[in-house]
Amino acid sequence: MIPRTAARPLSLALLATLLLAVLAPAGLPQAHAEGYNTGRTAPSMLVVDGSGSMRADDVGGRSRMDVAKEALSTLVPMLPEDASVGLMTYGNSDPATAASQEAGCQDVKTLVKPEGLDRQALLGAIEGVQPSGYTPIGLSLTKAAAEL
């Protein structure tokens, strides 16, 4: 088990790595099989953890959700104009209780479709995410891939 003091920098590094992995394709040109560059960017989906664990204090005594929102709110204005970026969240509709476990493990929602770049919609949706429930990360990644 990693000591709590060592876990804080690790969780920030993990968040940064996940953001990079999700967003790196947004800046890469999509090419034809022949290698021809179309000049368009590949559509991307931001997937935000809205589970109850995001309420925990992390870096600098701030909640994990506050750190994630700040990172995403910094990133969105920097996205290229021709990017197609959507936003999906998981785990923030149903509380993490035994009675809601089945529904909570299916709790994945697309808040902004990856159809162009609507910075205001992205920023508004990011701000509205409130952590509460379970962590259906696998299902969210499967659904994100299907929307792309």
Image (tube, helix red, strand yellow):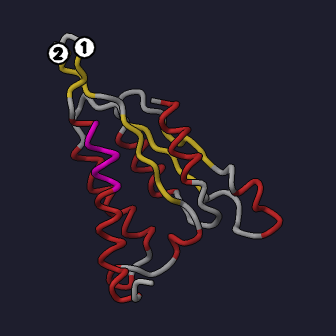
Measured from the top left, where is residue 92 in percent x and y? 61, 59
Residue beneath label 2, please?
35
Give the quarter of the image for residue 28: top left
Q: Judging from the image, what secondary structure is the residue with disc 2 in? A: loop
Residue located 44% across and 29% down the image = 148
Q: Which amino acid does label 2 sit on?
A: Gly
- Residue 32: numbered disc: 1
The reply, left or right, for residue 51 in relation to residue 17 is right
When the figure is inspected, residue 36 is found, relative to residue 26, above or below; the finding is above
* Total numbered labels placed on residues in the image: 2
The correct choice, above or below, for 2 with respect to 107 in the image is: below
Magenta: main secondary structure equals helix
- Residue at 40% across / 80% down in the picture? 58
Q: Name the one closer to the observer, 3 or 30.
A: 3
For the residue marked with disc 1, what is the amino acid?
Answer: His
Point out residue 143 in the picture as x, y percentages from the top left corner. 55, 38
